[in-house]
Amino acid sequence: MNFEFNDLQNEIRSGVRSLCSRFDLNYWSNCDKEGAYPEEFVKSMSEAGWLGILIPEEYGGAGLGMTEAAIVLEEINRSGGLGAACHAQMYTMGSVLRHGSKEQKEKYLPLIANGTLRLQAFGITEPDAGSDTTKIKTFARKTDNGYVINGQKIFISRYQHSDMILLLARTTPLEQVKRKIDGMSLFLIDLRKVGSAIEAKPIKTMLNHETNVLFINDLEVPEDCIVGEEGKGFYYLLDGINAERILVASECIGDGKWFIEQAVRYSNERVVFDRPIGKNQGIQFPIAKAYMAVQAAETINFKAASKFDQGLPCGEEANMAKYLASEASWEAGDVTMTTFGGYGVAEEYHIERKWRETRIFRTAPISNNLVLSYIAEHSLKLPRSY
């Protein structure tokens, strides 16, 4: 296994870092305070082609791999930014790319690649179902002209800043399927055409992630909105999960590196009792421990990305990477808060904002407890626990 990045990958890292330098910590702090979407940043990333990095060249993308995409998101967060504002633009299109019709690919992928069309919303989670996606109640009833969809979704991020949404709905009732993961279908819906059939209500959270509850009432969609085969939507969803895990882990790694850089700098500058606090092992050791955890997570994440790019099974590595990276970034954030002491909670140092932002990754897009259950069952062959 080669642990060195090639020239192209180093150029990507440098290019993203250069772009991010135009958006300083105050830019992100102001977005956070105002609850504003980082429109200018997302536009710049789109125009530079970074968000279309996974789309094949035939559809106007860069045609690069998961390793390169991981580098992009890591650098955004390492700069002190928030990759979650646009990360779904990179991977949500995967369902269309791998399972969509020829017409869907030709119509939408070039526009997603150049950023003129935003596919940043994924409608899966529901209030009653939670992590048990098989229990979703949103239902798409077949009609002569297509489907009529009714239901409710929750924690749907970036809905207000997306032109389209991938929506998971049941097309066969749960009690009528042989396997509970059957009977769900994936719909690619143009939000510019739904009118009042989808009502979005923002949810106030401690994060600037712009998330919503969606109420779907008699939404009529044509038959060509369905992605792939009817009833196979959950399989298509699983197909894209590894990409999401790897890219979210990359953001966590970027956060972890940012935290550690801040902690090291501050511990060298801050003088208490006539000596830099970085001389104290009580400060050194936690930072060193957090640094090692981030490095270890990065290694398993790039192993997952490498296997993904080779078309090899990588579910174990992708899940472990998401778990290890989110835990490492949280540890690094906590260590940095402790290193800064009272200053850590002061907005001007930006630690508290990043601390809030990185915490969500232990819960979303999948709870770390479910990752542990996955590893226990699939890697260790222990009995299924749920």
Image: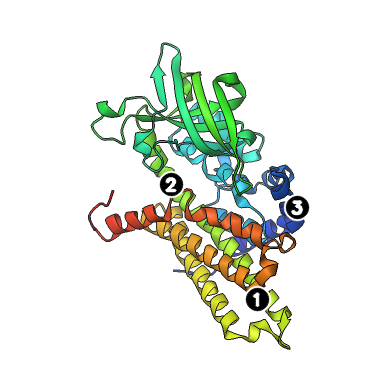
How crowded pointer 3 is (Cα within 10 Å; few <14, some 14-19, many 20+) is rated as: some
Q: Which image quarter: residue 13?
A: bottom right
Q: Residue at x 28, y 55 (%)?
A: 377
**Eyeballing the image, is 104 above or below 93?**
above
Q: Position of residue 56 (x, y in %)?
A: 54, 43
Mark positioned earlier in the residue sequence (1 or 2): 2
Spatial distance from mark 1 to mark 2, Cα to Cα? 35 Å
Looking at the image, the residue that sits furthest to the bottom is: 274
In front: label 1 or label 2:
1
Hey, what amino acid is under mark 3? Answer: Tyr
Q: Position of residue 235 (x, y in %)?
A: 36, 38
Hey, what amino acid is under mark 2? Answer: Ile
Q: Check disc 1 and report its element: helix, strand or loop.
A: helix
In the rendered structure, find residue 241 and report the number of the disc placed on it: 2
For the question of whether residue 329 can be seen, the reply is: yes
Spatial distance from mark 2 to mark 3, Cα to Cα? 31 Å
Hey, what amino acid is under mark 1? Answer: Val
Residue under label 3, please give it: 27
Spatial distance from mark 3 to mark 1, Cα to Cα? 23 Å
Mark positioned earlier in the residue sequence (3 or 1): 3
Q: Residue at x 53, y 30 (%)?
A: 214
**Residues tagged 1 and 2 counted as in contact (Cβ below 8 A):** no
**Eyeballing the image, is 316 above or below 110?**
below
For the question of whether residue 12 can be seen, the reply is: no
In the rendered structure, find residue 264 and report the number of the disc placed on it: 1
Q: Check disc 3 and report its element: helix, strand or loop.
A: helix
How crowded pointer 1 is (Cα within 10 Å; few <14, some 14-19, many 20+) is rated as: some
Position of residue 314 in the picture relative to residue 362 (left or right): left
**Residues tagged 2 and 3 counted as in contact (Cβ below 8 A):** no
Front one among 140 and 1: 140
Mark positioned earlier in the residue sequence (2 or 3): 3
